[in-house]
Image: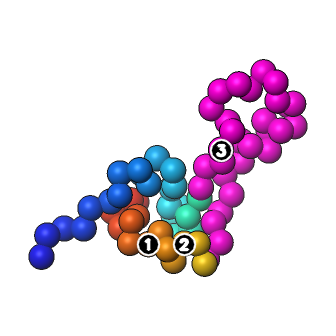
C-alpha cells in the first residue's frame, strides 16, 4: 500500500499543535489592511483552535502534517 499523502492545499491553512489540536488561520488578513481598524486586525491575527467536529473531517487530509 502506498504512503498517504497530505492534501497540498491544507498544508498552509492548518497547523497541528504539540498536543494534537488543530489551529486554523483566519481570512481577510493578507491585503487591503489599511482600511481595517487596529482592533479588527488584532482579532484577525489570532489563530483559533478548531472545533472537534470539524477536526474529524480533516484527519484524512492532514495525515502527514506534524
Residue furthest to the left in view is 1
Numbered disc in front, either 3 or 1: 3
The residue positioned 41% from the left and 50% from the top of the image is 9
Question: Which residue in the structure is indicated by mark 1?
Answer: 59
Query: In the rendered image, which quarter is residue 28 located in?
Result: top right
Q: In the rendered structure, are the residues bearing label 3 and label 1 in contact, judged by CB atoms less than 8 Å apart?
A: no
Numbered disc in front, either 2 or 3: 3
Question: Which residue in the structure is indicated by mark 3?
Answer: 27
| Residue 49 sits inside the magenta stretch | yes
Instruction: Tell me: 18 left or right of 50.
Output: left
Q: Which mark is residue 55?
A: 2
Q: Residues within 10 Å of mark 2 (few under 14, many from 20)?
A: some
Q: In the rendered structure, are the residues bearing label 1 and label 2 in contact, judged by CB atoms less than 8 Å apart?
A: yes
The residue positioned 44% from the left and 72% from the top of the image is 59
Q: Which residues lie in the magenta part?
A: 24-52
Disc nearer the start of the sequence (3/1): 3
Residue 20 location in percent, x, y? 51, 70
Instruction: Tell me: 1 left or right of 31.
Output: left
Specify the quadrant that holds the C terminus.
bottom left
- 7 lies above or below 50: above
| Residue 43 sits inside the magenta stretch | yes
Q: In the rendered structure, are the residues bearing label 2 and label 3 in contact, judged by CB atoms less than 8 Å apart?
A: no
Foreground pick, 13 / 66: 13
Specify the quadrant that holds the N terminus.
bottom left
Q: CA distance from mark 1 to mark 2?
A: 6 Å
Disc nearer the start of the sequence (2/3): 3
Callout 1: helix, strand or loop?
loop
Amino acid at each position: 500500500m502506498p504512503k498517504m499523502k497530505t492534501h497540498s492545499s491544507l498544508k498552509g491553512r492548518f497547523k497541528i499543535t504539540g498536543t494534537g489540536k488543530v489551529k486554523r488561520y483566519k481570512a481577510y488578513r493578507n491585503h487591503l489592511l489599511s482600511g481595517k481598524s487596529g482592533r479588527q486586525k488584532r482579532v484577525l491575527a489570532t489563530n483559533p483552535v478548531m472545533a472537534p467536529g470539524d477536526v474529524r473531517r480533516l484527519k484524512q487530509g492532514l495525515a502527514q502534517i506534524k
